[in-house]
Amino acid sequence: MAGDEGTGSKETLISDLTRVRFTNLDKIMYPPLHVTKKEVITYYIRVAPRLLPFLSDRPVTMHRFPDGMGEEDFYEKDAPQGTPEFVKIFSHYSGTADREVNFVVCNNLDTLIWLANLASLEIHITLSKTGAYESPDLLLFDIDPEPPLSFDDVIDVSFVVREHLEDTGILAYVKTSGKKGLHIVVPLRAGYRFGEVRDFAHRIGKNIAKDTSHVVSEFPRSRDPGTIFVDYLQNAQGKTMVAPYSLRGTPAATVSMPLQWDELKRGVRAEDFNIKTAISKKEEPWGGIFDNKQKIGK
């Protein structure tokens, strides 16, 4: 594969730490910050105890930047040629692609390091696990602003979404997307289908849009200037969200950062949470999330 970071003539084997054969560790991945691939790998090693539980048994989509942020990038669902034997693969037929897709599943540190060495700066996960791929265990609201609205406006709307969920007895979790918006996530009890989860999320958005003029709940209006779309459409089989603690391919090397709700205040910015600062948080804002699975209404 052209630009494949998994191959190369100059390799360093750090056998006492990992089975991964590293390549091009000095390559600059974030030119504005002069962050190298070695620093990206180091970040993922340090954040692994927090990140791996969210990757466990979930098909992964890699967003790869072989020559660094700002250069050509691509999404990759299939395990690339030369994938090592220690990487778990989940094969599933894709009606869209009309073929079996061989997804990577990142269940251990070696696989996470391997993904980082592939210059997969971003790691995206499905909302269901391999053992119940047709049944989501996460519900996602993706909330983004259209100019001239800003991140502060997204924060305001996110608290409205939280209030509507609490009114139905649902506890939600929030994280930055690492870009211009926020993700609100609800861990789900077993047995739901994507259609009913998507319908529930859509209904919440429509209820909010009735009372809030700048909130839209329908895709055709999602790019209207001065609006915020409460996006429910990612709640579909095979759709993904960027994993908590994943880096993003942004000039500031931002992170999709889980937060406590009381940390989310006007003036907070996505850039506050980046490769240099994210690891310094001492507490896990989403601690116990998978022990707190929710029931949603019909």
Image (tube, helix red, strand yellow):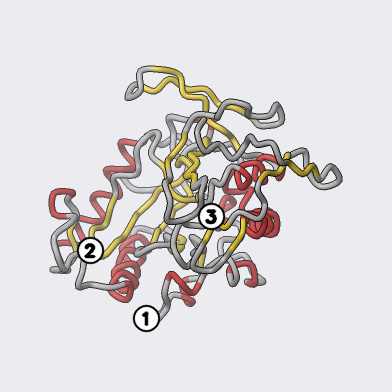
Q: Residue at x 29, y 49 (%)?
A: 232
> In the rendered view, does 95 fall on the left or right side of 31?
left
Which tag, 2 or 1, sits closer to the chain's start? 2
Q: Could you tell me the amino acid type at mark 1?
A: Arg
Question: In this view, which residue lies farthest toward the right?
Answer: 16
Q: Which mark is residue 172?
A: none
Q: Residue at x 34, y 67 (%)?
A: 158
Q: Quadrant of residue 182?
A: bottom left
Above-or-below relation of 15 to 193: below
Question: In this view, which residue lies farthest toward the bottom?
Answer: 267
Q: Which mark is residue 266?
A: 1
Above-or-below relation of 114 to 44: above
Q: Contact, CB < 8 Å: mark 1 with mark 3? A: no
Q: Could you tell me the amino acid type at mark 3?
A: Ser
Looking at the image, which is closer to me, 21 or 128?
Answer: 21
> Disc 2 vs disc 3: which is toward the camera?
3
Q: Could you tell me the amino acid type at mark 2?
A: Ile
| Mark 1 secondary-structure assignment | loop
Above-or-below relation of 5 to 103: below
Q: Residue at x 55, y 29 (%)?
A: 80
Q: x and y percent of residue 264 in the render?
A: 43, 75
Q: x and y percent of residue 277 in the render?
A: 59, 72
> In the rendered view, does 209 fall on the left or right side of 2?
left
Q: Residue at x 54, y 46 (%)?
A: 120
Q: x and y percent of residue 69 in the render?
A: 47, 55
Which tag, 2 or 3, sits closer to the chain's start? 2
The residue beneath circle 3 is: 246
The residue beneath circle 2 is: 228
Spatial distance from mark 1 to mark 3, Cα to Cα? 23 Å
Spatial distance from mark 2 to mark 3, Cα to Cα? 24 Å
